[in-house]
Amino acid sequence: MIIVWIHDATQNYSMSVLYKQKIYSIELERLIWIKTGIYKNKNTDHCYEQYKLWEHTYIKKDSMTLWDYWVFLMFNYFAEYLDFKKEDIDLLVVSSWKDYKSIFWNIEFTTPKSHHLMHLYSTYFLSWFTESNILIIDWAGYDLEENKIALQSLYFWKWKDIKNINTNYAKKEKNIWIWIAYERVSYFLWLTEWKIMWLSWYWQKYTKYDFFDLKNNEVYLKTSLHQIFCDKELFLKHYWLMQEFSQNWYQSEKIIDFVYSFQVEVEEAILHLANNLYEINPCENLCYAWWVALNCLTNYRLKNELKYKNIFIQPAAWDSWISLWNLLYGYYTYLNQVEKIWLSDTNYWLWINYNNEIENILSDYQDYIDFEKIENENDFINHISESINAKKVSIIYRWWSEFWPRALWNRSIIASVKIPDLQYKINKIKDRELWRPFWMMILKADQDKYFENSVDSKYMLFTNKLNQEWLKIYNNICHNDHSIRLQTIFEDNEFYFKLLNRLKYYWVKWLLNTSLNWKGQPILETPNQAIEFFLIKEWIEKLFLENYVITKKIGKKITSKKLSNNTLVNNVLNNMKMIFIKKTRFTIENIFIDIDIFTKNFTVNIVKENESIWKIEFKYEKDKYFLDKKTGIIDNDFSILILNVVDNSDFLNKLFWMLRWVFIKSFH
């Protein structure tokens, strides 16, 4: 049986496939290398969600919009590697309002009725619990049966017997709740939600603001603060933060104090809901889900300050992975399956293994790299250990991608904590703020020795507090509150278990692990991307790619960022933007692109103030594009520049880079 699950209802596209009783998943952003999510314009104070940047037109049988093409792209990814066709699909599950008959003809499909139920399925059915309380804290999730927007839900589930203890719905008089408040603060301070958590590690002065009303099963922002949290200027003035915005605003003690205080009160609100759920239904197990569940500071407090004995947090906790939740919903509800799926290192949701392509890929870079194949795994681990002991920053790229936002071991930058100025070097490599922290790997056997009230953190979901006796020795990897972002390594993770035990011969107990990516970009997916990242970054000295040890050839360096594959395209698009603004005196608000996958004809529609002001239509004939129609006052140079981008070679790839430019150059 082949079952396909799709999520495309918001900005986070993904697809999961059940094939020969194994589950595979892919997130669109790894295929097209465009970071999905919300893009914030600092100049206009507007948020643009990715799915709003394109106009979805009616789907005809012989054509697709770009949205449909993205679904088509993910499906082809699986079909090519797993060797099946769309005619082989038995069931389609979608969380979407669209009709995919243009892609999947005559296939039975179902749609989950509640967004929060999908969260519930995603966490409960991967846990090891037979019964559990379940806490869902969402941005907003639509409930088709209730016809309402659900915000926070409390459940108890004992196998197929579900009890909804309480669901908070959006209300006019209570229109800001935990995560909306979190999002507003992050936006007003030019942060992301995660940076609030990260910055709060760097200061410890708490001021009680009383942001939230904590009443039984409900948590909302205090009504008196609603207007303040809806206006950036009013917000900054009210909290005396306006004058703190300088070039290095994140170094302001006042702002960091405020961020820390806000983080603490968010934690108190979440603990309030979880504790109230326990008082109503004293079950020793808790399942916890959605994006807020990736906040490891809060998670540590949930584990140590409440009465729950066991807490399970789904590592793929937010909406990019709705396809996985759809999978579980369809598996248990639509197909009435009984056998429970357990989250383990042998069945977690994996993408495609590129191992069979490595030799051909390496030959493409033989002018830039030297490489040696190591057949024996113990010898390979010895090579890595020697590199780490020599205080060299390295990349490990092995097996398949992991289906969650933090690279646990297969797409990682690793280093010894003994490297001088380690934090500075790693953050420069990743092109991110110099105050950003990173994760530390440690063996389970060593964890209790170093930490008080130790919490296992296999999936990078918990911080831990360092014991007082170790503070002086490890203060270079410790935050101001004595916490460390921790990744616990167990024996079932054979490769890293062997590696960390081998490192003990060098008196190395800690191994830095951070995701293989740039700031603002997805985790790198392909071997080509890993090699090019390695060649571009001067402080990375070795790449361990599958079972190859790779070093850089002396005197050979890739000068342009070949990884992004966009040097030519971005030059054209930058010129296009410059000409457009100069000749029209208008800034680009939206660019909508519709593409016919079968004919390759496409339309560029430029929108200002919700009205189409220019429209350009291109036709593809005899391996070339020509301008077919244009509406509005468009300079010929502008049309020609677009034609330069979409000539007959690598059309779709270049089109994606055009879209990426719209995000990064216009809206970010």
Image (tube, rainbow, N blue to C red):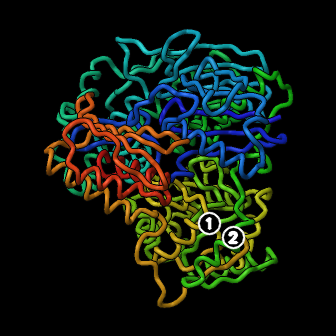
Return the residue at label 2: 358
**Quarter-of-image position of residue 226:** top left
In percent of width and height, residue 668 lies at 32, 48
What numbered label is drawn on residue 527? Answer: 1
Q: Are marks 2 and 1 in contact (CB under 8 Å)?
A: yes
In percent of width and height, residue 126 lies at 73, 35
Q: Is residue 296 left or right of residue 104?
A: left
Residue furthest front as drawn: 622
- The answer to whether residue 515 is above or below residue 164 is below
Label 2, label 1: how many angstroms apart (C-alpha)? 7 Å
Q: Residue at x 79, y 62 (%)?
A: 494
Q: Residue at x 75, y 41 (%)?
A: 85
Q: Residue at x 38, y 54 (%)?
A: 202
Amino acid type of the residue that numbered disc 1 sits on in the rendered structure? Pro
Amino acid type of the residue that numbered disc 2 sits on in the rendered structure? Ile
Label 2 packing within 10 angstroms: few (<14), some (14-19), many (20+) = some
Label 1 packing within 10 angstroms: few (<14), some (14-19), many (20+) = some
